[in-house]
Amino acid sequence: MPASTPCIRLCVLDPVTGLCEGCGRTGTEIAAWGGLPEAERLRIMATLPARLAAADAAPRPEAEPAAAVA
């Protein structure tokens, strides 16, 4: 039986939150995923929707304005 995974193949770690933009896991969780017991994977997966919602609702730092090109 394959390990449970929330991966949707959108593997981009957000530099502000440190969460994967696709699944909501941290880089540490992603790296350890294959070695975690199924119960721990399921426990983490249960927290991911709330993590992603909180990350989406959090204020983001203002982007630096682009320098004018002459």
Image (cartoon, rainbow, N blue to C red):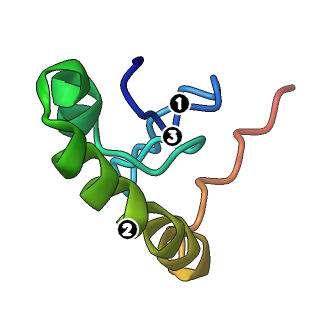
Relative height, residue 60 to residue 15 (above, below): below
Give the number of the mark in front: 3 or 1.
3
Q: Measure the C-alpha gap from mark 3 to mark 1.
A: 14 Å
Q: Position of residue 50 (x, y in %)?
A: 48, 76
Residue in the foreground of this view, choosing between 47 and 63: 47
Residue designated by label 1 = 12
Q: Amino acid at mark 3?
A: Pro
Query: Would residue 4 be found to the left or right of residue 12 on screen?
Result: left
Relative height, residue 54 to residue 17 (above, below): below
Q: Amino acid at mark 2?
A: Thr
- Picture residue at 44% right of the left edge, 61% below the top: 48
- Mark 1, Cα crowd under 10 Å, few <14 / some 14-19 / many 20+, is some
- Mark 2, Cα crowd under 10 Å, few <14 / some 14-19 / many 20+, is few
Q: Measure the C-alpha gap from mark 1 to mark 2.
A: 19 Å
Relative height, residue 64 to residue 35 (above, below): below
Residue designated by label 3 = 6
Please tell me which of labels 2 and 3 falls first in the chain: 3
Q: Position of residue 5 (x, y in %)?
A: 45, 34
- Picture residue at 37% right of the left edge, 68% below the top: 47
- Picture residue at 27% right of the left edge, 44% below the top: 41
Please tell me which of labels 3 and 1 falls first in the chain: 3
- Give the residue furthest to the right: 70
Q: Position of residue 59 (x, y in %)?
A: 53, 80
- Picture residue at 79% right of the left edge, 38% below the top: 68
Query: Would residue 30 be found to the left or right of residue 69 on screen?
Result: left
